[in-house]
Amino acid sequence: MSPSAVEKNAERLTLRFAQLDRAIEARATETIFQSARRGGVRILGACGGRGTCGSCYVRVVEGAVDYAPVRVHAADARLGAEGWIRACQAFPKSDCTVEVAARSLAAVVRAEIGTPGEAALHCAPAVTTYDIAVAGASISHPAADAERLIGALPAGAVHEIDLRAARSLSGVLRQARGHVRARVRNGELIDVAPAGSATLGLAIDVGTTNVAAFLVDLERGTRLASLGIENPQVAWGGDVISRLNHAIRAPGGAAELQASATAAVNALAHDLCRATGTSIADIADVAVCGNTAMHHLFLGLPVAQLGRAPFVAAVRAAMNVKARDLGIAACPGANVHVLPNVMGFVGGDHVAALLATEERWAAAGTSLLMDIGTNTEISLIHRGDIWTASCPSGPALEGGHISCGMRAADGAIEGVAFADGQLALTVIGNQEPVGLCGSGVVDVLAALREASAVDARGRIAASHALVESIDGARAARIAPGVGFSQDDVRSVQLAKAAIRAGVDVLLALAGLNETAIERFIIAGAFGSYIKVPSGIAIGLFPDLPAERFVQVGNAAGLGVQRVLASTRERGRARDLAIRARYVELSSAADFHMTFVKRIGFHSTPSARRAS
Amino acid sequence: MSPSAVEKNAERLTLRFAQLDRAIEARATETIFQSARRGGVRILGACGGRGTCGSCYVRVVEGAVDYAPVRVHAADARLGAEGWIRACQAFPKSDCTVEVAARSLAAVVRAEIGTPGEAALHCAPAVTTYDIAVAGASISHPAADAERLIGALPAGAVHEIDLRAARSLSGVLRQARGHVRARVRNGELIDVAPAGSATLGLAIDVGTTNVAAFLVDLERGTRLASLGIENPQVAWGGDVISRLNHAIRAPGGAAELQASATAAVNALAHDLCRATGTSIADIADVAVCGNTAMHHLFLGLPVAQLGRAPFVAAVRAAMNVKARDLGIAACPGANVHVLPNVMGFVGGDHVAALLATEERWAAAGTSLLMDIGTNTEISLIHRGDIWTASCPSGPALEGGHISCGMRAADGAIEGVAFADGQLALTVIGNQEPVGLCGSGVVDVLAALREASAVDARGRIAASHALVESIDGARAARIAPGVGFSQDDVRSVQLAKAAIRAGVDVLLALAGLNETAIERFIIAGAFGSYIKVPSGIAIGLFPDLPAERFVQVGNAAGLGVQRVLASTRERGRARDLAIRARYVELSSAADFHMTFVKRIGFHSTPSARRAS
């Protein structure tokens, strides 16, 4: 290594991802995986870069890395022969060009216009588009560019001009020879684009663990494509509290977290536009939802008061801010509409979920909406009243912080059944199983209970055909190289007990019994794949008739798209945020007692399920 | 010099001005004078740093400089003994602490409340201030900080929160224990300050040569202090066209010019607040006016189309932008209101001057408003019609680009009379004369004409008691070391001819003779000091009875203060900008002919003045 290269290591390096058309800043002291996350490049990594899951394979096409994996995986030898290494174990020594393995690359989910089940959104966007022809200036008519442009618009349409729009309009007018598309929001001219440009919107659901983005055609109300990546803030802790602590205590911590959320949004926008052949410069409006902590970290709001009782948000109402004030790339004067919070940690993502599912819950006398995520929000709706709480359920139910957990990608066990004394597995992509995704986690625990490999208190049996002891620690053997440890069982127990205790507290407040729930709506990207009987078996859901359950997928994602596309829906979101009555579980008298009661399992799972 | 110091020279150095409580970035390749200008530190420098005027004395208290003056001044030896050197001839070799000589330091002109002639402004500011008490949050009432604050305001007062205000309000609420002052503009909460804070406004007149700032108490409508510094954009050319060319052609040129204007405004705000014991964080609103070129360069608007015929502005109407988008320091969500332009190069500064003088011109049937500056704007107002033009008069009339020109500071000759075959001088501060300020320039030329030292075509006499020939070039000797050269005479001739031809064109358009002008209003900071008979003598003004002339000082500065303090005045400014009919002189058929006719002087000046 030359001295200049050594010096350069102390500075910042560049990682190029040619297949993604992305280049990001990296550090020699950080793994490729960490840099990719920070830069919003979507490499899978279920274990968060601890080197345990084997999901982040990359190949270094150009440049040098230090690679000394802490733990060898079964797949390493096979893939290593082809040059694949794990990004979380590789430190760049120079600028590198990196290829991401197909299996480690999150896929762009593209929804074509008219896809069954993809109803068009109600389309009344905050940004109005005008296609106009603007006359040129002359000695006899030397009116200013903006003045001539505004003169070509309906009278009164514009009374303010965004600074960046003002800076760009003279150039666009001349380049497009006066044939332009003007974008106006609330009487403010926010952009002038050449005629024929699309008018796009970007809806973002900032989850604690994942960030989902939806590219919407704001003229037709159709979704063009969607994409999810891991929230790069995971680098500062999988849970909300670790991140709040980082923002509060580390110098520049809040800015780091804000910048990393912004980078994720920009990366998603980049990839979505690339996949659909559209341009970021045509993104005329952005809508964002997240729980209150994600909301504050995204906006760079102070969180010291949110991190301790009484958990006070800085802002509850919806905010409209300039995209540039957040560092988000879009058209020159684009705004970001951030959905209103309810209170405590119940944020705009739950408002969006309530909005997206209203047709379902409003039709029943008593409904329960459960949006399962790293934070699980629950709303009990009874005769028009909405009680809402947030449970810190952790990432276990999504396959996170589980020893062999991984995302729902090829090789992930997504289904497990116990029959004839054996575990029958369903694996995504019909491949050799390499880990467990969220639905698989719930299934595994239900199956292990049924097999009596886990007792009612959650202990793995000392002696059982499915159990093996490695270094004195018991684990159920699910597949070669894929185990389910005592810690994994405990993680799931804590998650389901927190969620179930939340349900109990809300029911008690409403004076209802769980059998009163006529409609049980399971939301969340992961919630779509969970098998309801398995959820009932492990006590995550109450034991209600199957027909009362409905799984609606990422309701928050749908809600934020609706809000993006329609000012009417923004009004509805505002009303729902005010209508929802927040219940602070940590101060609810019966929460902790109920939580403890819900830690264990039914004493005879098989008998109960058969009944 | 140590190697690290050498390396450091290639990077940026810091200049500290302890007496001003300022630290700015400097470069080893730039003089202290240049760095000071760029950073908005107010060192006098009439010659623009060419080393000719000797007005920029500083002392290096700490650090090292290279000092090798190109030309030795009479004052150098005397001041040098005390350690004073000229800032325009000194290059920093390290970080330095620099003291500015009292005579080289532009003074803060402070107007106390109730100063005679300082009528309070009409006070209806765009920003409304509310003093409120906000209850704390509790477990039983954990409402968000912004929600509790808005609840303490009149219903409907706030419907949006500025992002930066949102970021700061939680801290301020707790620090001030809920006793706060909320600042609201157009329903947007822009700031929350501790109770008892002042609510200030900053009015800025960005002239081509000087930037004037006025600090206003927005609750009382009183001016607290005012201050002017040279426009640091002078570093890229004294005239508008050089700067436009730099912005158009140099990579990053527009950004450089924008940043330098911003730095000047921030420096003025800093010094004004320091002088009045107030805080920049209490500046709740900013209003700015300038000619169209200064307006565009200040806002970072494109100027390519403004720099060539038909001289089209990007934006004519008033703009409201966030101070942060321009890099201007103020309260978190402060806005900058930029006055509307008329057209061509006639900008918001002339609108402000029209606004400030309306009581005067509206009272007469026919009035003429002449705002003398590097660009001189002229409005002819006749029976409600307003014809407006802009003349590129250059800085000569303000003492700029004159060989011994200087600002109106101690040692400047401000008055010259010819009597008994001799020049009688009036010197600011009753000191030994060191140069000529603007009013002195006009006086000198009138006196030299009267003495017949300059002929009707502007030639300096070959043989005259007041004339000496240095290296073959003739110059009138005004005082020891202070001369008035043939080039100086030519500069003044070009300036006065351009202005007077402009007047002629407007009169012709209105079908009037100059004697029809019932009121001749002379505006401009320099215009206050000019002696009207001298102006008539050199042909700058028409030969009207003395009582028709009125000198109103910096009318643009007063106008921008009015606009700052009152939304009603913003409406009036908008109306005036639309009402004024722009006349493009360069395409007026008779302008060039008239200009040539106005270059010379009356054939018998003395006789004429005596008549």
Image (spheres, coloured by chain):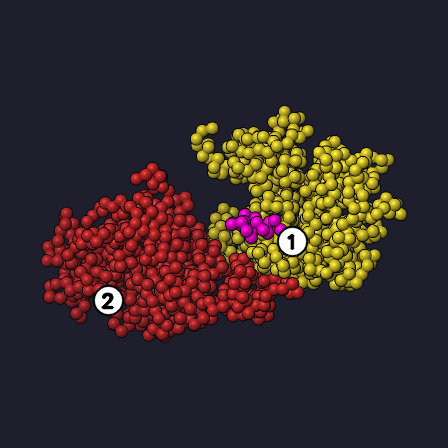
Chain colours: A red, B yellow
Of A417 and B440, nearer the camera is B440
- The extreme front residue here reads B472
Q: Which residues are magenta?
A: B241-258
The question of residue A325 being in magenta is answered with no
Measured along the vertical axis of the image, is residue B358 above or below residue B88? Answer: below
In the image, what residue occupies the spot 83% across and 56% down? Answer: B515
Q: Is residue B283 visible?
A: no
Specify whether disc 2 shares its chain with disc 1.
no
Please give the residue where the numbered disc 1 appears in the rendered image.
Answer: B291
Q: Position of residue A92 (x, y in %)?
A: 30, 46
Crowding near pointer 1: few (<14 within 10 Å), some, many (20+)? many
Q: Amino acid at mark 2?
A: Lys
Please give the residue where the numbered disc 2 appears in the rendered image.
Answer: A531
Q: Main secondary structure of the magenta part?
A: helix
In the image, what residue occupies the spot 44% across and 66% down? Answer: A200
In the image, what residue occupies the spot 83% across and 51% down? Answer: B543
In the image, what residue occupies the spot 57% across and 53% down? Answer: B299
Of all chains, the one bearing label 2 is: A
The question of residue B256 being in magenta is answered with yes
Of all chains, the one bearing label 1 is: B
Q: Amino acid at mark 1?
A: Asn
Q: Is residue B32 visible?
A: yes
Q: Position of residue A315 (x, y in %)?
A: 46, 56
